[in-house]
């Protein structure tokens, strides 16, 4: 057996004999938004805390690590235990210390699988006598920050890895730098005879933003008005008549006291608005320095919105620009991204052969206008990258839930099998007044291992999220029937 094939078929969390006594998922998504207010972070932690997909399903027992337990979270843990057919419950750090205290000689340590690995997670794991999994915290910090990521990409010289023209700015220079980039874009389009066809605009993101939280898209519409779309949410969109007013309104929204701690005032990345047709995610698993691509995944968006409302296996239409880009750049983008991550680790003094974890990069597939501009400016065909998420994502967390729900060992090979069979997520579902906990009871199969198409409840609250495995339409119909049955 080759070394590479062995790693594809080994437990990504490490082979242990005997098996680990306990592995817990720790969905610390709120910690990603460190520039946000405590209220905003707590709201995200409460919403996503129940979403327990990424875990070592080969361990004897499983659970969720939470600050404190609650009846709601406890009931959801029972549901996950029935789904994964494992002893599954909620654990606090006090509980983990007690489990560690009762370990027998020779038993492996407990494992904490965080949403993203950080110094705080490492300290928490050490305090309870556990191990943690993920890329090294220093590397995570460098890659997830939008400002440092753009700087690292530009300096890397990795062929095929590009970021759009941009400016690094702050609250004081936000308006001036945005207007400067708009003026640069206007002159660029005029120089190449595209001023009446390529829409003007900028995408602005806080350096510590995650997903679309902490972003603002400002662009000129066909009717001449200038739209401001905060957090990628079209329902929050507002309009102004001048660029100065629009950029000022954008700054007020992005630095809102409800979203950003006024004591921190983080920096922003201001990027040229691009003509895009799609923006798939791409995830790569690193195991002791070797990388394994999980391929591209689709990001589902509402019409007129940039907010990601779900994810899916990437299956573009035949003959589309997306299909052509996938065929041309999927393998190249994985290699370029893995090379970039390895190179960055080396710069930080981290031995590349020690890298173990998962990372995602958002690829931007440009449309015909941007393709024309690149030809006229002498650039080769290629792709852009928007941001790096050196952590689990909505999609890869769902893939791992598929591992657990099908009773498979958590290996790269099995992750690819789940993807091939079909995995889809939906972040918010209209429940029409139905109780999400009732829906959860209805969709749970009598024998999860024997059911090919599955609907899984991820977050049992009013903004209920779901994972669908297998055939999307059949799995979605299971959820729709459950909602209909649970209506008051």
Image (cartoon, grey):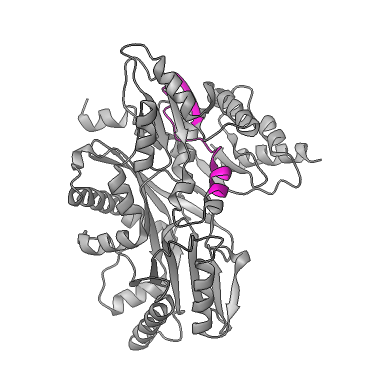
Q: Nearer the viewer, residue 243 or 406?
A: 243
Image: magenta residue range = 42-64
Q: Is residue 279 visible?
A: yes
Looking at the image, the residue that sits furthest to the right is 488
Picture layout, residue 14 above or below residue 435: above
Looking at the image, the residue that sits furthest to the front is 263
Q: Is residue 406 visible?
A: no
The stretch drawn in magenta includes residue 47:
yes
Picture layout, residue 332 above or below residue 421: below
Q: Residue 264: where, in percent of width, then height?
A: 43, 61
Report whether 9 appears left or right of 278: left
Report whether 343 appears left or right of 324: left
The stretch drawn in magenta includes residue 259:
no
Quadrant showing the C terminus: top right
Quadrant showing the N terminus: top left
Residue at left 33%, top 88%? 191
Q: Residue 327 lies in what quarter of the image?
A: bottom left
Report whether 252 appears left or right of 410: right
Q: Residue 169 lies in what quarter of the image?
A: bottom left
Residue at left 36%, top 25%? 129
Picture layout, residue 143 above or below residue 107: below
Q: Residue 391: where, in percent of width, then height?
A: 39, 45
* Total count of labels: 0
Q: Residue 476: where, in percent of width, then height?
A: 63, 42
Q: Nearer the viewer, residue 19 or 138?
A: 138
Q: Residue 301: where, in percent of width, then height?
A: 55, 58
Q: Nearer the viewer, residue 452 or 130?
A: 130
Report whether 256 appears left or right of 323: right
């Amino acid at each position: 057996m080759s070394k590479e094939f062995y790693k594809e078929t080994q437990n990504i969390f490490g082979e242990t004999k005997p098996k680990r006594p306990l592995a817990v998922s720790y969905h610390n998504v709120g910690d990603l938004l460190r520039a946000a207010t405590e209220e905003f972070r707590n709201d995200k932690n409460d919403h996503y805390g129940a979403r327990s997909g990424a875990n070592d399903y080969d361990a004897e027992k499983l659970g969720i690590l939470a600050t404190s337990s609650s009846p709601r979270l406890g009931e959801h843990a029972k549901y996950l235990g029935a789904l994964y057919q494992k002893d599954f419950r909620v654990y606090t750090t006090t509980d983990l210390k007690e489990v560690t205290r009762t370990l027998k000689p020779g038993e492996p340590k407990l494992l904490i699988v965080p949403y993203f690995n950080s110094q705080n997670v490492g300290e928490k794991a050490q305090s309870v006598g556990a191990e943690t999994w993920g890329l090294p915290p220093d590397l995570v910090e460098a890659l997830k920050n939008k400002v440092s990521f753009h700087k690292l990409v530009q300096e890397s010289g990795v062929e095929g890895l590009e970021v759009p023209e941009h400016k690094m700015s702050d609250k004081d220079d936000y308006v001036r730098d945005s207007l400067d980039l708009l003026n640069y874009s206007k002159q660029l389009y005029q120089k190449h005879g595209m001023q009446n066809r390529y829409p003007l605009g900028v995408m602005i993101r806080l350096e510590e933003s995650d997903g679309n939280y902490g972003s603002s898209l400002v662009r000129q519409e066909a009717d001449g008005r200038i739209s401001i779309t905060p957090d990628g949410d079209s329902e929050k969109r507002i309009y102004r008549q001048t660029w100065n007013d629009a950029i000022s309104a954008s700054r007020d929204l992005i630095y809102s006291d409800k979203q950003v701690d006024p004591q921190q005032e983080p920096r922003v990345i201001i990027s040229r608005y691009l003509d895009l047709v799609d923006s798939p995610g791409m995830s790569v698993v690193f195991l002791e320095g070797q990388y394994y691509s999980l391929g591209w995944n689709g990001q589902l968006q509402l019409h007129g919105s940039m907010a990601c409302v779900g994810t899916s296996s990437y299956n573009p239409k035949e003959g589309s620009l997306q299909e052509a880009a996938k065929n041309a750049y999927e393998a190249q983008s994985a290699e370029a991204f893995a090379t970039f991550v390895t190179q960055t680790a080396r710069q930080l003094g981290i031995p590349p052969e020690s890298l173990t974890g998962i990372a995602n990069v958002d690829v931007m597939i440009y449309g015909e206008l941007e393709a024309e501009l690149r030809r006229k400016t002498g650039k080769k065909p290629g792709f852009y990258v928007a941001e790096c998420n050196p952590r689990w994502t909505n999609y890869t967390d769902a893939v791992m839930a598929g591992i657990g729900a099908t009773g498979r060992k958590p290996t790269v090979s099995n992750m690819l099998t789940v993807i091939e069979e079909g995995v889809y997520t939906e972040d918010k579902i209209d429940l029409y007044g139905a109780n999400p906990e009732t829906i959860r009871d209805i969709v749970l199969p009598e024998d999860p291992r024997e059911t090919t198409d599955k609907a899984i409840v991820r977050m049992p609250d009013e903004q209920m999220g779901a994972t669908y495995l297998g055939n999307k339409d059949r799995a979605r119909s299971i959820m729709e029937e459950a909602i209909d049955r649970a209506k008051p």
